[in-house]
Image: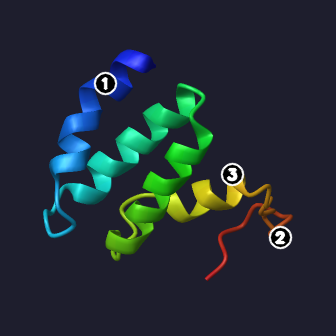
Amino acid sequence: YDAAVLALQDPARRTSAGRPWAARLWYAYADALLAAGREQDARSWFEKVTQVDLDGQTDAGDRLLELDGVVLEDLDDDGADVE
C-alpha cells in the first residue's frame, strides 16, 4: 500500500480540481492512504473528492461517513428495487 501511496502522491498533489480526472485520481490516492493506515490523510483527500465529484462518479461521501462511524442500512427488506 505504501508503494501505491508513493506512486499516486505526486500526480494527486499536482492535479487541479478543474481536471476531469481529478475526482478519480484523488479517490484512488485517498483509498491507498486508507489502506496504508493513514486515516486522517485519507479523510482529507476523500473530502477533496466530494468537492469536485458533482456527478457522483465515486462513493467518496459514503467513505467519509464510514470513517466517521456512520452506518447506512438498506430499508428495503424485500429486496425489490425502489422507484
- Label 2: which residue? 75
Residue drawn where x is 40% and y is 63% of the image: 48
Q: With 3 as the anchor, is 47 left or right in this view?
A: right
Q: With 76 as the anchor, is 7 left or right in this view?
A: left
Dot 3 or dot 1, earlier in sequence:
1
Q: Position of residue 55 (x, y in %)?
A: 33, 74
Residue drawn where x is 69% and y is 51% of the image: 67
Dot 2 or dot 1, earlier in sequence:
1
Instruction: Out of 21 and 73, give the one closest to the viewer.
Output: 21
Local packing at callout 3 (Cα closer than 10 Å; few below 14, some 14-19, many 20+) is some
Local packing at callout 1 (Cα closer than 10 Å; few below 14, some 14-19, many 20+) is few
Q: Which mark is residue 6?
A: 1
- Residue type (three-letter) at the residue carrying disc 2: Leu
Q: Position of residue 59 (x, y in %)?
A: 50, 58
- Residue type (three-letter) at the residue carrying disc 3: Leu
What is the secondary structure assignment of the residue under circle 2?
loop
Q: Position of residue 27 (x, y in %)?
A: 39, 49
Q: Which corner quadrant holds the N terminus? A: top left
Instruction: Out of 70 and 57, give the one closest to the viewer.
Output: 70
Q: Which mark is residue 67?
A: 3
Answer yes or no: is residue 59 visible.
Answer: no
Answer yes or no: is residue 2 visible.
Answer: yes
What is the secondary structure assignment of the residue under circle 1?
helix
Tag count: 3
